[in-house]
Structures are given as structure tokens and as C-alpha cells.
Amino acid sequence: MLPIPPDMLAYITIDTEYSSGMVRERGPDCRARNFAAAVSGQTEAGEYGLGYKLDMFNRHGHRGVCFVDPMPALLWGVAAVEDVVGPILERGHDVQLHIHTEWLELAGAVHPLARATGGATGRNIKDFTFEQQCALIDWARDTLVAAGAAPPVAFRAGNYGANDTTLRALAHCGIGYDTSHTPGIAGGDCAISLSPEDRVPLRHEGVIEVPIGCIATVGGGLRHAQITALSAREMVRALRHARDAGKPCFTMVSHSFELVNRRRGKVNRIVRRRFERLCEAVARMKGVRTGTYAQDPPTVVALDPAETLAPADPVAETLRIAEQLASNTLYG
């Protein structure tokens, strides 16, 4: 009897973060309002942010990976990060490290971390030197642990804005996995020296790089596997293709706030239903299960790049474009 192949891992990840933009608009006293809008997803109809997504995971027996940004502690202390980490751990999900370096500028030059980085600021972690990136990663990791999380083993840069120096800094700091490489975003902030054909986990600059999933589009382009970028039909099809191609994992991205129009305080019913359908479909899918970096770390494989990409589906793409138009019209 032939051995049964292991299930492919679906990493459903949530970038979990306060809004630095709200701080710029409203000042540093907006912590409670910021949490309500960006993390808990408060609306007139209830909360549709982080807790809602984690409860949906639990309903279907899934494990989620939350990349939590501890940088707001620069302004508000560790308690602000505890408010984020606590609900994740209470529901049994994975906490990993996320860094938005925009918060350095908001904190100002008096903070010890600012002094450790020589007063440097930047939109992305790639804007800093190796030594500065090490200081940022060390501080953020220690702050995340102080907020109750286990020491992180994986990292994603805010805005995907990492470079090869970031990967070397992660390795130096003892973090073995990065998932900032985005084959499906042309011209984005990611500056890691990998190509759009690098779509499976591989060793690079001392860590294992775990690319964000993507699909082919009509016309020869790529589109990344984010809840706001692909329809449920496209994501499910991408998962099935990845499973059948022998990929060990497929990574999808979401955010703690993306089911809600934060300015209007209104749930986006189209994106919410998209997320719900994805959770339902993965629960039914044979040969696929959700995983975490802590318990189900990615494995390195060598596959023909041509076999790792779900081909374009003109019908699904047309329906998604219409769905996106309706979403933007109704919910902004």
C-alpha cells in the first residue's frame, strides 16, 4: 500500500495591528478608539475584527496565525499589546512577530529604542541598517513576549517592506522563518532578492522564506492571496491546485480590520462572507488543513515553478472584479 501523503498546510494569517494613520490624524490619545476600529472591528452591528475571525476559525476547527505588531507599545506601553495578544491566546491561536516601523517617528527621539537606532526613522524595516534592524527586532520580540506571547519563530514585515538585510537580522536574532516575500505584488515594498517564480518555502539569507500565495491572472500577471484581493472561489481553487502540485503549504493574508470600513464603522458584508466561505471550504477540503508556524513549521521543497501557480480562470476573475466593484460601491 502506498503511503498516504501528509496534508498540505493552509496558513491563514492575520496581520494584527493598531493604526498608525489614526495616531497621525487624531493624536496619541486615541488608543481606545484605535483598538475598536483597527483590532476589534467595532461597528453598529457588532464586532467584526480580530475576535470575530478567531471565533470563525474555532467554529470550523482551524488554527490561525496572528502576526502582531508590538510597536504601538512605544506610545502606550506593553498593556496595549497585551490587549491584542490576550484574545488570541485565549482562543488557542498562534502569535508571531510583525513590525511597522512608522511608529518610531510617532514615538519621537526620547524613547530608548529611538536612541538604540540612532534616531533613524523609516516607513519600512528595510530602510534601516543591519544593526538598527537587529535592535528593532530584539525590542519588538521582547515586547511581544512581555505581553504574554511565546518567543516568536516567524516574522512578517509591515507593508511587506523587508530586504535581504532583514533576513540576516532575523537569523542573527534567532527567528528562523520570514513570510514577507510577495510574488503576487509587482512593484511593492518588498525588496528581498527573490523572483516572482519563488513561490514555495526556500532557504535564503539564513532563514526559511515562506512566500505569500498567489494565482495567475488573465493577461499573464499575478495576484496575491489576500482576503481583499481574491474571491473565495479563487482562493479555494488556489488551495486545491497547491495541494495537487505537492506544495507543502499555501499562505493567505488578512488583516484584523479588513472586514470593516473603519471610517464609517460599517461591516463589509461582501468581504465578511468571502472570509466565511473560505473557512467553510477549508474545513471540507480533503488533503488540506490549517497550521501554525509554532506547531507546523514550513518545510523546504524543490518544485518546478510552472507547477506551483494556479492558472488564470477568466470566469472567476470576471466575477471577482464585479464583486470588488460592488464592495467598493456599497462599503467604500
Image (tube, rainbow, N blue to C red):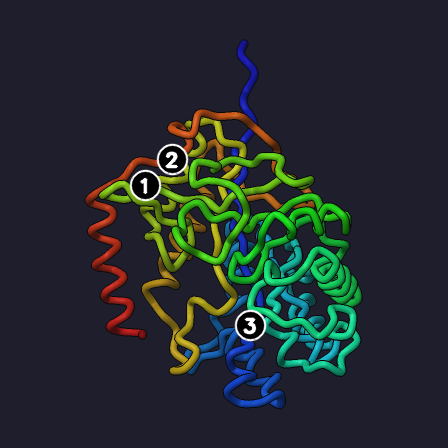
SS state under label 1: strand
- The residue under the point 76% across, 55% down is 150
Instruction: Report crowding for label 2: few under 14, some 14 to 19, many 20 or more residues within 10 A (C-alpha).
Output: some
Q: Position of residue 253 (x, y in %)?
A: 48, 54
The kind of residue on which mark 2 rests is: Leu
The kind of residue on which mark 3 rests is: Val
Q: Is residue 149 above or below residue 71?
A: above
- The residue under the point 61% across, 61% down is 125
**Inter-mark Cα distance, 3 to 2:** 32 Å
Q: Quadrant of the C terminus?
A: bottom left
Instruction: Report crowding for label 3: few under 14, some 14 to 19, many 20 or more residues within 10 A (C-alpha).
Output: many
| Disc 1: which residue | 216
Q: Is residue 181 left or right of residue 80?
A: left
| Disc 3: which residue | 39
- The residue under the point 76% across, 65% down is 139
Q: Nearer the viewer, mark 3 or mark 1?
A: 1
- The residue under the point 27% across, 62% down is 324
Q: Position of residue 294 (x, y in %)?
A: 69, 46
Q: Is residue 325 above or below residue 163?
A: below
CB within 8 Å, label 1 to label 2: yes
| Disc 2: which residue | 309
